[in-house]
Image: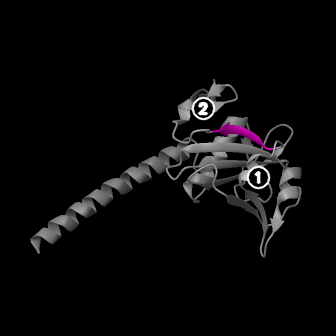
Amino acid sequence: MIDDFITKKHDFELASCFIGSYLASKMGLEKLGILRTQRDIQADYAEWLAAELFGLELATNTVQEGWDAKDDTYTYQIKCRKVKSLCDSTSFDFKGLKANFDFLICVFFAADLQILGVIKVPYAVVEEVSAQNKSNMRFRWNRERARDERIEKFYWSESENKEVSEIEVEGRTGEEKLDGK
């Protein structure tokens, strides 16, 4: 009985420590402007990451329809998925496709939120290859789409076992690109 109490007390203390770390981390990520909503962390992280990589301004309204960020000329819809591999098929869904954005930016994360890839897709391509299902439009990512030359692989890990700093991005390493150098 006493052993159970000691184990439970230890578990509660450990949980309290982890919750404190989580809340402190969350506050820090909010201060950095990475967490902007109460959604899953990967959505806010993907939007922040895309804004940093492409030099975009994030929309002030985080629930507006159509686009998430803009530059001086274009608007961008930003979506993300956790995948095991960049070869995995996945989809990016839209309630409808009205020309509310100029480019779709897709961020592919590993389960631990390491960046595997970032692509930029012109709206015309999204519209052309998306399919309607019962409730929405679906932009399907698969091997065929990965070979589509109209889709820019802005950041792509050829070997998903590499660290982010080793991934080549437009002739620079991922670390340099993420540092803005």
Residue bearing mark 2? 174
Residue sitting farthest toward the left: 2
Which residue is found at the position 10% from the left and 71% from the top? 2
**Would you say the magenta stretch is mainly helix, strand or loop?**
strand
Q: Dot 1, how many residues are within 10 Å of its Cα: few (below 14), some (14-19), or many (20+)? A: few
Q: Measuring from the top left, give residue 69's x and y in whole percent.
A: 75, 46
**Does residue 49 appear left or right of residue 152 in this picture?**
left
Residue stretch rendered in magenta on the structure = 151-156
The image quarter in which residue 160 lies:
top right
**Does residue 39 appear left or right of residue 17 in this picture?**
right
Q: Earlier in the sequence, mark 2 or mark 1?
A: 1
User: Which three-letter amino acid code belongs to the residue tagged 1?
Assistant: Glu
Q: Secondary structure at mark 1?
A: helix
Query: How many numbered tags mark residues here?
Result: 2
Q: Is residue 117 above or below residue 140?
A: above
Which residue is found at the position 21% from the left and 61% from the top? 10
Residue bearing mark 1? 144
Asked whether the beta carbons under mark 2 and mark 1 sit within 8 Å of each other, the answer is no
User: Which three-letter amino acid code belongs to the residue tagged 2?
Assistant: Gly
Q: Measuring from the top left, give residue 156's x and y in whole percent.
A: 65, 39
118 is within the stretch colored magenta: no
Q: Measuring from the top left, give residue 159's x and y in whole percent.
A: 57, 39
Between the C-alphas of marks 2 and 1, the distance is: 25 Å
Q: Is residue 37 visible?
A: yes
- In the picture, the quarter occupied by the C terminus is top right
Q: Is residue 78 visible?
A: no
